[in-house]
Amino acid sequence: MVAQLVAEWRMSLSTTAARNLATTTKTRPQSQEITDRWLLRVLPWVEARGGAYRVNRRRVPVAGDGLVGCTAIGSLYRVIPSELAEVLAGFADEDVLSALSDRFEQREFAAGDTLPADGVTVVAHGKVSKLGRGEYGDTVVIDVLGEGGCVGQEVFRGGEPNYRVEAVTDVTALTLPRSAVAAVLDAAPHLREHLSRRPPAVNKRGEAEIAVASGHDGEVTLPGTYADYELHPREYELSVAQAVLRIHTRVSDLYSAPMNQAEEQLRLTIEALRERQEREMVTNRDFGLLHNVDPSQRIRTRTGPPTPDDMDNLLSRRRKTQVLLAHPRTIAAFGRECSRRGLNPPSVSVEGTEQASWRGVPLLPCDKIPIGQGGTSAVIAMRMGEENQGVVGLYQTGLPEEHQPGLSVRFMGIDEKAIASYLVTTYYSAAVLVPDALGVLDGVQL
């Protein structure tokens, strides 16, 4: 009754009734999952014909990552015997390595403690700094080591370390006293003989050296040489991300104006595939960037937060770093450290947008870089392109029913329920051509 009276009192048509005759302006379907995907945008893409990409390199006579792995049972750690070959020039006698492993003693250190210098120490958990004396008597940080880091290897060859080791965080370490090293060397003379051999000639990158003569005069005999190759180069096979998109024919037939339902469904599905592609290229344990960093290019922060000093250390590990990738929260943490020091790094233009930078290298956001339970993340530094011996993305174009480069959409038919199916597929991978093309700053505290 009240509504009828109100309607009688109106002097014009209500907006509620008028909307029945109006055309509504609509947006395309939106998705919060879509990001800038900077990694996919800046990475150079290379054709991988045959679905594989072989990276040929010069031979490295003594291969290894330089880290000594440990196993853990509860709170008890033990050095993996075979991992000791990393610091023993490839020595492979399992009995001797087991005897060495059994002699390691587990010790706990608090942040700020100095670790013992008279022996070999393996970091099982935590972070330590190698500290040396500078030219003017000041203390300088030589390196920062995390899990698997080993110090005191000089003891195996009778040397003395010219540095001290200090715990940055609470540390669990496995220590091998000099007396235990001497006992094992006395019981295994072939190990002592192995360590006394002259190592193969290598360049500063560890590759088999190419002998070159220079500065000579007259008729001298020039050295014969050749460039040796890896016998078993790595091959990267293209990975795949797929989805079966289903659309009822009644929906596509009757409700495709003003927007085509099939096109919108396909667009959102492709966006999801591209997001998954970038995540895999960062975190996949086979070809993901975070898992393909050479140990020499994996460094840790000196204190915790990402400071300008840490960024400089990361950039100095390679020539021509072209891009830095970090989680948006990591970029915010770096900005706070710059502000604390009164620094304001200039932004740089990347594809028409202003981005943060350091030393002129763009610092691009990538939310696919994970954040650990302890609130730590990583910063990725890359040199890119085949011509730069850098990092490249891999794909294959010319696929049947290709919709975008390296992505195909294939009609699979209509079933008895009148549902049309489309197979959406993209093939991709990433390859690191030489170790120093890719680096990571690990343990970044946010």
Image (cartoon, rainbow, N blue to C red):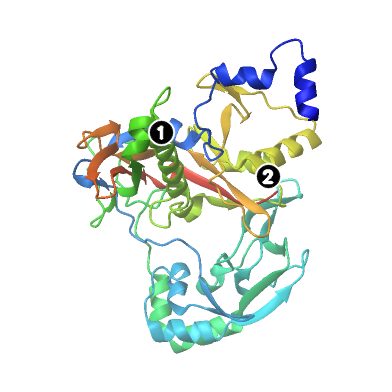
Q: Which residue, as the protein is rendered here, is positioned at the far top?
A: 11
Tell me: 131 left or right of 203. Answer: right
Regarding residue 165, the answer to whether it shows in the image is: yes
Dot 2 falls on a residue whose secondary structure is loop
**Residue 78, image x, y percentages:** 55, 80
Residue 163, image x and y in percent?
66, 61
Nearer the observer, 46 or 133: 46
Q: Would you identify the image quadrant in which residue 249 lies?
A: top left
Instruction: Report the residue at 41% width, 49% height from top.
Output: 205
> Is residue 223 something one can see in this rendering?
no
Tell me where residue 256 appears, x and y as whole percent.
38, 28
Mark-to-mark CA distance, 2 and 1: 37 Å
Quarter of the image where one finds residue 268? top left
Residue 212, horizontal then vertical, whole percent: 30, 41
Residue that mark 1 sits on: 267
Mark 2 Cα within 10 Å, few/some/many (few <14, many 20+)? Answer: many
Q: Above or below — where is 229 with respect to 11?
A: below
Please indicate whether residue 271 sits to the left or right of residue 337 in the image. left
Residue toward you, 257 or 267: 257
* Residue tagged 2: 306
Task: Kindly indicate the quadrant of the structure image that contains residue 127.
Answer: bottom right
Q: Quadrant where the N terminus lies? A: top right
**Residue at the spot x=29%, y=32% of the render?**
403
Q: Which of 410 and 27 is in front in this view?
A: 27
Badges 2 and 1: C-beta atoms under 8 Å apart? Answer: no
Residue that appears at 75% across and 46% down = 136
For label 1, the SS is helix
